[in-house]
Amino acid sequence: MILALTGGTGGAKLVQGLAAEIDPADLTVICNTADDAIFHGLHVSPDIDTIVYALAGLNDEEKGWGLAGESFVALEQLRRLGEEVWFNLGDRDLATHILRTDLLRQGVPLSDVTQRIRTALDVKSEILPMSDDRVETRIVTAGGELAFQEYFVRERWAPEVKRVFFAGIDESKPAPRVVQAIGNAAGIVICPSNPVTSIGPILAVPGIRQALREARGKIVGVSPIIARSAISGPAHTLMTVNDLEPSVNGVAKGYADLLDVLMIDREDQYLQNDIKKLGVEPFSANIRMNSLADKQRLARQVLALL
Amino acid sequence: MILALTGGTGGAKLVQGLAAEIDPADLTVICNTADDAIFHGLHVSPDIDTIVYALAGLNDEEKGWGLAGESFVALEQLRRLGEEVWFNLGDRDLATHILRTDLLRQGVPLSDVTQRIRTALDVKSEILPMSDDRVETRIVTAGGELAFQEYFVRERWAPEVKRVFFAGIDESKPAPRVVQAIGNAAGIVICPSNPVTSIGPILAVPGIRQALREARGKIVGVSPIIARSAISGPAHTLMTVNDLEPSVNGVAKGYADLLDVLMIDREDQYLQNDIKKLGVEPFSANIRMNSLADKQRLARQVLALL
């Protein structure tokens, strides 16, 4: 079994590639849930949904979020009813959030909700939330504290960030099967997701980082940074806030205790020796993924390294 | 101010007629909420919504329920996710239920939720739930107990009914402004809705029936029964269960302590003397409403009697 740790967009591309290269039933994915948010009373798990939709082949490749061919009738009506609707929730997507909210309120844990949804959508890979407990990424900006989605979607990551923390993380436990999956994995991939707000929370759930350190499988990371800038999103900015250089060096430093290999882009090849000094083996390749062929090629390279 | 007591479909037609004949701001409507139900964790108030949508001009005239031009994308996805979806919830309609559920969970009373929704949709008439407390119509059938919507929508009122009761009614209180509206009304209309499951629960909320008996305004009822059969739905069946003859006589008997006048159809004119014996003044007219013109004509006749 191959295990992937991931956030949303960037990670989803590699996860798609992996699921295309091996039997998807042999892939397990641990998702960040610290970006989860409540909109209009509905529990939204953006990273889980991005992964499930991508593996179900339902995702919108062009937009990079949500479902292909989505309509927004309910959201328009919520706007008319006076709701703030800056977070885009499509009609088909809403069904996921309505069902999840209903089941969570009935006491069903998020991991079981996720299994029900991915099974209904014929996703063969196991998708695990990092935790069944509520953890919330909080972004402390010059203008006050924001939830992650407020910072990322509503404010388009414009505010200056002072600090990032994960509310509830100390009391959180890994979801069932997470530690076991880490222990059993033949190889582990840390996807090219934001090291601070996507992979960071997963590693900060008490017990997960230690389980990874003790894992028998090799651990390969793929850098979300090329040439000192995130492939998408604010990873470079947030890394600086967390005293990590916004570069492949910073990525290597953040994961140094875990990684056997870090895949970096050819553009960053000149930094290989710095990475080696951190005890991580660099491997340079073209790590941009624009097409399914790119995703599969990168997945093949990752699998070869494992 | 004119006050109307109503359920959904049939009553909505007369309410539309009334709002077209007087200043809609001078119309107050008290709605049955004992048909309210939870679907997929969302609180649905079918009668309130039917009235609000009708007065907002958004209702589907042909189907007699829901919104015109509605899509059902979210519901189809809920079905795919394994949910039972026998209650039709359109995408636009869902926005109402999502907002209502969110506000109720925050502790906002149903009457305030209703006011927010009808105001957002530019409905000038005040729409009041009979109560802010949860009351639930239960239908005891030969095969077991059903919620009203299970009996009415899912089972298409096929099961044999043994008994009808309103769970929670004894502990319920009239919603704010209900008793005051009854006292202040210049005239009161009991709409052609099901006497047992639509008007019945309103009258059974402790205090409402007594307030109507003491009302200074005249009370005019419009029969939902023509020629021993309901204009729509199972009113005649349910009246029999409640020991009311399924006829205009049964309607008159059920409301005898309240009504000054009962409007009946010309077809039932031959029963006028029976109605008079119950102390109610019969008034015969064409009470079927197929067009807006019909609704307005009937509303004018009702207003003249008040």
Image (cartoon, coloured by chain):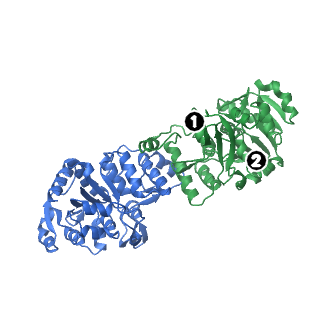
Chain colours: A green, B blue
Q: Quadrant of residue B11?
A: bottom left
**Secondary structure under the numbered disc 1 in the rendered image:** loop
Q: Is residue B100 left or right of residue B197?
A: right
Task: Please state which amino acid type lies under the numbered disc 2.
Answer: Met
Residue B130 appears in view: yes
Check the picture and name the quadrant holding the C terminus of chain B: bottom left
Residue A78 percent coordinates (x, y): 45, 44
User: What is the crowding at mark 1: few (fewer than 14 residues within 10 Å), some, or many (at least 20)?
Assistant: few
Residue on which the image places disc 2: A1
Residue on which the image places disc 1: A155
Q: In front: mark 1 or mark 2? A: 1
User: What is the chain identity of the residue bearing mark 2?
Assistant: A
Whether discs 1 and 2 lie on one chain: the answer is yes
Q: Is residue B252 left or right of residue B180?
A: left
Check the picture and name the quadrant holding the N terminus of chain B: bottom left
Name the residue nearer the viewer: A4 or A256: A256
Against A234, residue B161 (above or below) is below
Residue A73 percent coordinates (x, y): 44, 41
User: What is the chain identity of the residue bearing mark 1?
Assistant: A
Name the residue nearer the viewer: B238 or A27: B238
Q: Quadrant of residue A52?
A: top right
